[in-house]
Image (tube, grey):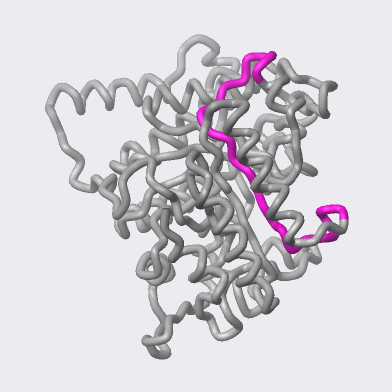
Amino acid sequence: MHICKKCCTFAVEFNPYREHIMKRILLLLVIGITLTSCYHKTDSPRGSWAKGADLSWLSEMEHDSVKFYNDANGANGEDCIELLRGMGMNAVRLRVWVNHQTGWSNKEDMLFLAKRAAEHGQRIMIDIHYSDFFADPSHQTIPAAWQQYDYDQLVECVREHTLEVLYALKEEGIKPEWVQIGNETPNGMLWPVGKVEKADGHWREYAGFTRTGYEAAKEAFPDINVIVHVDNAYEQRDWFWESMQAYGGKWDMIGLSHYPMMSAWNGGKSWQEMNELAEANIKRLIAQWHCPVMIAEVGMFANDTASATVMADFIQRITAIDSCAGIFYWEPQVYGGWRPAEYIPLGWGSYDMGAFTPDGRPNEALQIMLRSEK
């Protein structure tokens, strides 16, 4: 469990975690140790086109004995990361929850997957949710351990948690290329303290959380790309970025989610219209804010024959945009009705926008995405 040190009554001024980290860094500088587990070498150079996948459920799926196959291997299956790497994947995105009761997607689970991804030559994106469970436009719940804190204490919690996550990676010799300060935050984060809606709400607080996370990330890794991530790639949200800037929010890159086949979420728009609108919005954001845009999440219906056509159209559009930095498929490895343990008591069904076939092989949409060139 993460506990915000500065918020504890016995340690308002003294921060033992930070003290420990600083001593460790000084020790490394003095004795010139090169970590033997240094994983920062990758198959593609930093800043090149990212063809990635969010694989945060992978360790739990493996725990449940789910197998992954290509056209050549047999009954024993293949390591999912190596399988996707062989198809062209060069980056892995991993979420971090503060203290989920199952332990999945907490810091230790993220580290386990990050080490494996780095060993397979993958660039790393860390997606910090600042919550004990999924954070998204409808849910930005303050972690249980932080529930009683005021704004200033929460700012320190954001700082400490960001440092804790990133220094844990640093101690393993892993240098992430990107970090998200929050997940899908068009309505802010850490509700109700940092909740926003268009021009209303607690913009000072939300922008303060984002700025604090940004500065902590740069303290750990000065050249890391800090992403602010919102949903609905097709939707113009000038008010959001203007308010972020006005209240001192910081970012290096804009992250967007794109689920073009979800017409129920997208006002009944067709996937063609979704792709067209997303392309136009990406260009507008790049031109207005002079920063790259990353498709941090994409998903298609796994068993819909149109998914390959949808993906091919979208890839053609975004690879033609100079400052579009890349694309990450969200949990493509899910297939066969698998669902995480916590979904069962919640009555939630399985995720149906993975990108593996019913027999556990990458589908055509995923192959199109991973084989794209720029």
Identity of the residue drawn at 63% across and 33% down: 285
Residue sticking out furthest to the top: 13
- Residue 65 can be seen in this image: no
Taking the image as shown, residue 115 lies to the left or right of residue 1, namely left
- Give yes or no for residue 200 being in the magenta stretch: no
Q: Position of residue 317 (x, y in %)?
A: 58, 54
Taking the image as shown, residue 343 lies to the left or right of residue 19, namely right
Identity of the residue drawn at 62% across and 41% down: 282
* Image quarter of the N terminus: top right
User: Taken as a whole, is the magenta stretch helix, strand or loop?
Assistant: loop
User: Which residue is nearer to you in this view: 101 or 355?
Assistant: 355
Q: Position of residue 331 (x, y in %)?
A: 57, 62
Residue sticking out furthest to the bottom: 75
Relative to 361, is 26 above or below? above
User: Which residue is nearer to you in this view: 339 or 257?
Assistant: 257
Residue sticking out furthest to the left: 31
User: Which residue is nearer to you in this view: 190 or 106?
Assistant: 190
Relative to 112, is 140 above or below? above
User: Which residue is nearer to you in this view: 208 or 278?
Assistant: 278
Identity of the residue drawn at 73% across and 35% down: 186
Q: Position of residue 163 (x, y in %)?
A: 46, 29
Q: Position of residue 131 (x, y in %)?
A: 66, 40
- Residue 357 can be seen in this image: yes
Which stretch appears magenta? 245-267
Relative to 31, is 48 above or below? below
Q: How many marks?
A: 0
